Image (cartoon, grey):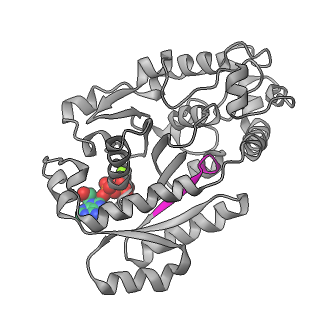
Amino acid sequence: MKIAFVGKGGSGKTTLSSLTAAHLAAHGHPLLVVDADINQHLATALGASDAEARGLPALGDHLPLIKDHLRGSNPRIADAAAMIKTTPPGRGSRLVRIVEDNPVYDACVRSIGGVRLAVTGPFGEDDLGVACYHSKVGAVELLLNHMVDGEGEYMVVDMTAGADSFASGLFTRFDVTFVVCEPTLRSVGVFRQYVEHARGFGVNVVAVGNKVRDLDDVAFLQAQLGDDLLTWLSHSDHVRAGERGDVRPVAHLEEANLAALETLRWTADAAEKDWSTYQRQAVEFHVRNAASWGNDRTGRDLTAQVDPGFVMGPAALAGV
Ligand SMILES: Nc1ncnc2c1ncn2[C@@H]1O[C@H](COP(=O)(O)OP(=O)(O)OP(=O)(O)O)[C@@H](O)[C@H]1O
Ligand SMILES: [Mg+2]
């Protein structure tokens, strides 16, 4: 299952991504975690030292490798330079699984605190907005578009909720999107904006409260979010200890917060996968991006990359 954490700056995206990742890893689930947030703090939240975090390879530095791997022998994609972030898989493309041996994972995935992590690398000016040919987040979108994940396997992405994910199809790539909400009007406002944009595309969006301190906070979130509020985590001493460099095993998290993580997992598990919609939306956003900047940038007609005969999903994996 593909899981995104988004939300207002500072709401707790990275904290909830890391707790969820650690929780899934502790249960032995196949897992790939990606830090695609502007502020790259996920490695540290998982227990990496600053030096370790700085030393991590970045997806953004391996775009040619990623593109070359994923395009495989797809005859519609002549070379890596013709591949933009929205280029969808087709017959001949290499699909990837959550856990497997491949050169992309060799180059970009490292284990931090028992969690397999890839990071986009810090964003530059190039990385935000529609026309980001070299976009680091583009690497994540490409991986998601080529990812065939099964039941009980998870990809967790710590993401910015900004315009970048709406400019491409990135926000439609997840089985569930958790919008982290502090009990504040601004945080709830970010949830509403996200929903307004995303639900029109059939995106499964729910709110997860965070940093809840008392019953007033709970009442506020319930009143503001109604049925959209899935669960919440309280302001946590366990998390604060992590902030002091004392990252403890997730099993030691407060009981109610652990139960909230379980709710997140069940919610992801309950999401219905619809591979044909997944591919159709990838194609839609590709055609749109090709017209708005991709064709100009590459000097080719990128809509020719769409393979109408390709069926995405586990069966395609077997075929490849
Ligand atoms: N449940 C919690 N209990 C205590 N502190 C928390 C909790 N959740 C988050 N925090 C703290 O709040 C701060 C912001 O959290 P975090 O970095 O996860 O947010 P973010 O949404 O990823 O922020 P950014 O927008 O900067 O990426 C951190 O200091 C974190 O330790
Ligand atoms: Mg963050």
**Residue 198 at x, y percent in the picture:** 65, 60
**Residue 191 at x, y percent in the picture:** 52, 68
Instruction: Give the number of callouts.
Output: 0
Q: Is residue 15 visible?
A: yes
Taking depth in this image into account, of 48 and 25 the one nearest to the observer is 25
Looking at the image, residue 55 lies above or below residue 247: above
Looking at the image, residue 158 lies above or below residue 193: above
Q: Quadrant of ligand 1?
A: bottom left
**Residue 135 at x, y percent in the picture:** 55, 34
**Residue 18 at x, y percent in the picture:** 33, 48
Residue 283 is left or right of residue 95, and the answer is right
Residue 266 is left or right of residue 272, and the answer is left
Quarter assignment of residue 209: bottom left
Quarter holding the C terminus is top right
Looking at the image, residue 8 lies above or below residue 88: below
Q: Is residue 226 magenta?
A: no
Looking at the image, residue 150 lies above or below residue 167: above
Q: Which range of residues does the magenta coloring cover?
A: 171-179
Kindly identify the residue that appears in the image at 50 percent across and 17 percent down. 102
Residue 203 is left or right of residue 114, and the answer is right
Kindly identify the residue that appears in the image at 26 percent across and 65 percent down. 255
Quarter assignment of residue 306: top right
Q: Is residue 177 magenta?
A: yes
